[in-house]
Amino acid sequence: MRRCVMEAWRGVTVLVLWLSGGLGVGCGGEAQGEAEAWEETSSAMEEAALGGGVPQPCGRTPVLVGDLQPGLEGSRPEALVAVGSRLFYAADDGAAGRELWVTDGDDRTSRRVKDVRPGAAGSTPRFLTRVGGRLFFVADDGAHGPELWRTDGTPQGTVLVADLRPGAAGSAPDNLTQVGGRLYFTADDGVHGRELWSSDGTGAGTRLTQEFAPGPRSLFLDDLTDWNGRLALVAYGDTSVTLWVTEADSGTARVYFRGPAQTVLVALTPAGRDRLFFLVDLGLGEADLWVTWGSPLFTFPLRRFPGDYPSELTPLGGAVYFTAGAEGFFGEPGDLFFGAELWRSDGSLLGTRRVKDVRPGPEGSLPSGLTALGGRLYFAADDGVHGRELWSTDGTSRGTVLVQDLEPGPQGSTPTALAATDGWLFLSASTAVRGREAWYSDGTPGRVQALRDIAPGGLGSNPRGFVRSGGAVFFVAAHPDQGEEPWALPFLPLSRCGRTAD
């Protein structure tokens, strides 16, 4: 129960990462400039490869990529995933239920890939995962139950991969993870219990990879992670909790860590070529940061952190950054001297240290939204003077600086939904004049710029999920008259932007 509560609590962090803002396109004089930019989208990546320049935000005005469900509610797109120059997502148009949609990036429209489950119920696509040039997902067509599907973006290329558990119950694949060109996932075929499977996208190439508990009983398998071509996962059993690492080429699995049944083992985070970091709570309510250097013999604890578990483990170079020292979920005291601050570990005892005491005292600066970009880490923090604003660090105390004070005063702009793409940082921030809207930056201090509002005045459009695909950055945002729908900002080499719009 403790494990479920803590994981659910940490899920709040993910929900907080919702973008807010008005993005901008206008690569020329408004409507004409937008059209010119969009026409160039399909060839943008080709030109970049031929030396056409580095892609960048092209103007500041966003383009609606189809009003899928007219009205105030909108289609509520979810799980934006890029596959080449196409962007896939799940959405509900109000007629066919929640199905899979795609935009090719060369126009301003979206289309339903396939009505997998005809009727208003919809197939509810979820766990969208890219493997090579195809997209895998889980859907329920109303006949086979939730099973594994794949698509190339065309109706005829959208097919059921394998009916692992015939009947309406389905095998309910979960934890979809790409490793070495194959898709790994957990599923229950009704015979072996929930075990580890893998697929190459064909029925014949979908197979039971490892049975951790022979027979119909199952272990709880979680946190499947690609570790430089190896598959790492956690298995929760009746008597122990185990970190397994499977070699993708040979299928050989080894135990790297084993703890008692009450152990919570979470946050598998690869960093560099040979390090895998993870958190271990042996039932004490506090977590130790562990690391393995590629072998069970070189797997060891680095440091225990009081209070809440370290959060947002984020790799940068050969190190991992994280927030630690906050008060626990049930009021357990955190770091009584420094509070929650930014930490860094290179996988050694001496190299596990606090980066900087951004807000001196026990309250701490509570870093959040950790995002790596161009050799630096960006995050939101409150230094007690400027409020919660955007900061960056090179891993040293001296190199940890305030990027920009977007909302002067102690309240701050509260940046969230940080997303890095091709040398640019997108984020949501709230100001008194604009409300919560979208901003972008090349990372240079003092150069965080506002994208144009989607929602007028101080309403805020709450964009989220910035994803680069082809010649555009796509996202979800809410207009007060249209609800949540997909939007896009052309992201092109400068020579393709034409005349600059603002």
Image (spheres, rainbow, N blue to C red):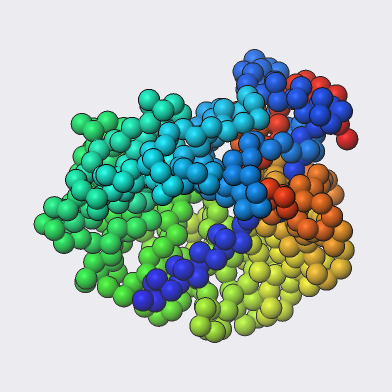
Which sits in the foreground, 169 or 95?
95
Q: Nearer the viewer, residue 64 or 120?
A: 120
- Who's the residue at 64% across and 18% down the image? 43
Q: Quadrant of residue 17?
A: bottom right
Q: Residue 48 in the image: x percent, y percent?
A: 66, 21
**For the N terminus, which image quadrant?**
bottom left
Residue 336, quarter of the rendered image: bottom right
Task: Please tell me whether residue 89 is drawn above or below residue 16 in the rendered image.
Answer: above
Residue at left 72%, top 50%? 481
Q: Residue at x 43, y 79 (%)?
A: 285
- The answer to whether residue 186 is left or right of residue 415 is left
Q: Position of residue 124 (x, y in %)?
A: 42, 48
Asked whether the viewer can see residue 136, the reply is no
Q: Could you say which is closer to the camera, residue 444 or residue 19?
A: 19
Residue 239 in view, yes or no:
yes
Quarter residue 467 falls in: top right
Q: Is residue 210 above or below residue 401?
A: above
Give the quarter of the figure containing the C terminus: top right
- Left or right, 213 with respect to 29, comes to left
Residue at the outermost top position = 50
Residue drawn at (50%, 44%) of the image? 95
In the image, residue 206 lies at what x, y percent?
Answer: 24, 37
